[in-house]
Amino acid sequence: MEPKDFIIKPDSRILVTGGCGFIGKRVIDCLVDYGFTNIACLTRKSERAIKNKMFRSDKIKKAQVEVVHGNLLSREDCLRVSKDAQVIYHLAAGRGEKSFADAYLNSVVTTRNLIDACIQQSCIKRFVNVSSLSVYTNQNKQLGKVLDENCPIERNPALRHDPYSYAKTKQDEILIEYGKKYSFPYTLVRPGLVYGPGNEKIHGRVGIGTFGVFLHLGGSNIIPMSYVDNCAEAIALAGITAGVNGEVFNVVDDELLSSRRFIVLYKKNVKKFPSIYLPKFLSFFLCLMWEKFYEWSEGQLPATFNRKSWYVYWKPTTYSNDKLKMRLGWKQKVSTSEGLRQYFMACREMEDHA
């Protein structure tokens, strides 16, 4: 892609929140590859610790990447770090929070503060919010049909009892609301399962480990996978490509594996472990029973497994990246076979050090 297709100049200010994370540091690598030289990485950690972690990348060492310290819960910090930023990549989010309050605070309130600061600064040309495929609902979609950017969003995300997907849904709602109310320029990027070195866990879309046995829930379901470098490329392009304000982009790779195929390859390349496949009718029934027990016990047992989650993670679905290719010119740079090779190698190293 030629520079004339970009909405900013090579020396324009770019802010990346969560830039030292699993995906964020690869986004910075992509921006450096495209010739951008004025990049700031926001972190709440000490500058020295972040530099030691981030600057292992040869690309980042050569670029003028500034590490800025701040907390997005502070409106003053948001004003300071967003000053002169023409493109903001918002990857920082509350992950691992067990309560809805914490997830809302660290994903939704922080996003609102940052957007408010951008509006006050009046220099932003594009705000890229990195969301998730989990915000969609599959409940009324026919089995096996394509999930794309036109599919409906979950209207009652709290009923999934998943703070992360709840916060992501509310985060998207705020951004869309600001876009309509203030003509705020944004794009939404919704990756599926992002894998690679640095994220070695087997995702819940495949199954769950319990009492020494892995319950395989995915079966023949297609996993919406994206190797981390490919996902980062899509995110980077969503921020600098002209003519895509207000657009939504789902991110998956070209060649997607079934859950069953993934398990076979994992056992072959990393380690063998006992697993039991639960047919879809049985996993759905167990989710229903879990819901009923949650209601009967008046919430003593959290409804971690429920039908709304089942529709999202284990209902047979296919995925599309057509819009990503057509509107952003995205191409899968790291093949699925190479991505899996690097992922499995990282998994083996983790097992060796466990």
Image (cartoon, rainbow, N blue to C red):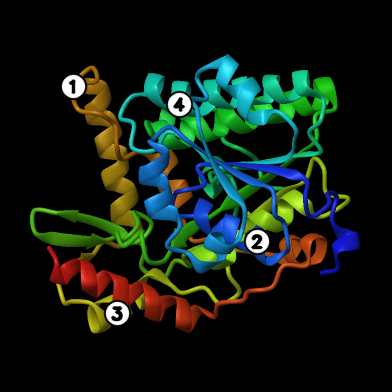
| Residue 2, horizontal then vertical, whole percent | 86, 68
Task: Of the two numbered discs 3 and 4 on the same chain, state the one appearing first in sequence.
Answer: 4
Is label 3 in contact with label 1 (beta carbons under 8 Å)?
no
216 left or right of 17 in image: left
The one nearer the camera, 199 or 30, is: 30
Secondary structure of the residue carrying tag 4 is helix
Q: CA distance from mark 2 to mark 3?
A: 37 Å
| Residue 10, horizontal then vertical, whole percent | 79, 55
Which numbered mark, 4 or 1, is in the foreground of this view?
4
Is label 3 in contact with label 4 (beta carbons under 8 Å)?
no
Task: Of the two numbered discs 4 and 1 on the same chain, state the one appearing first in sequence.
Answer: 4
Task: Of the two numbered discs 2 and 3 on the same chain, state the one appearing first in sequence.
Answer: 2
- Residue at screen point 14% across, 71% down: 352
Q: Which residue is mark 4?
A: 106
Q: Amino acid at mark 1?
A: Gln
- Residue at screen point 65% across, 25% down: 174
Task: Of the two numbered discs 3 and 1 on the same chain, state the one appearing first in sequence.
Answer: 3
Q: Residues within 10 Å of mark 1 (few under 14, many from 20)?
A: few
